[in-house]
Amino acid sequence: QVQLVESGGGLVQSGGSLRLSCAASGIIFSIYDMGWFRQAPGNERELVARVTSGGSTNYADSVKGRFTISRDNAKNAVYLQMNSLRPDDTAVYYCNAVRQITYYWGKGTLVTVSS
């Protein structure tokens, strides 16, 4: 049974920081590309950041320079360090694992940034 469990969301003031974590189980974590997506009310789910199984990263333009994705294969975990948060970063953040045509989603963690 595959599980992706996000944690670390919460309420933070504009300019603040949060660190999201995603703990994976039931998969061979190291061979999956891992990503963070987010969905704000009324919006489609969008990619925030991704780290491949080989360690390459890419980011949405809106978060470049503010967010950092990392993974720890020994702990089967992926992280998203979010700095300089803005109100428009408010969303439910989802962890995603992808390998070829197989993908899994976590249930999400809510991040709310107040102005």
Image: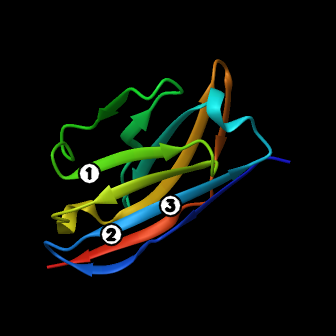
Residue 56 lies, in percent from the top left, at 39, 26
**114 relative position to 93: left or right:** left
Residue bearing mark 3:
21
Query: Which is nearer the eye, 40 or 76?
Result: 76
Asked whether disc 3 touches disc 1, contact meaning CB atoms under 8 Å apart, the reply is: no
Residue occupied by mark 1: 67
SS assignment at label 2: strand
The numbered mark at residue 18 is: 2
SS at badge 1: strand
* The quadrant where residue 110 appears: bottom left
Ranked by sequence position, the earlier of labels 1 and 2 is 2
SS type, badge 3: strand
In the picture, measured across the screen, residue 59 lies left or right of residue 100, that is left
- Three-letter amino acid code of the residue under disc 1: Phe
Local crowd size for mark 1, using a 10 Å CA cut-off: few (<14), some (14–19), many (≥20): many
Which quadrant: the C terminus?
A: bottom left
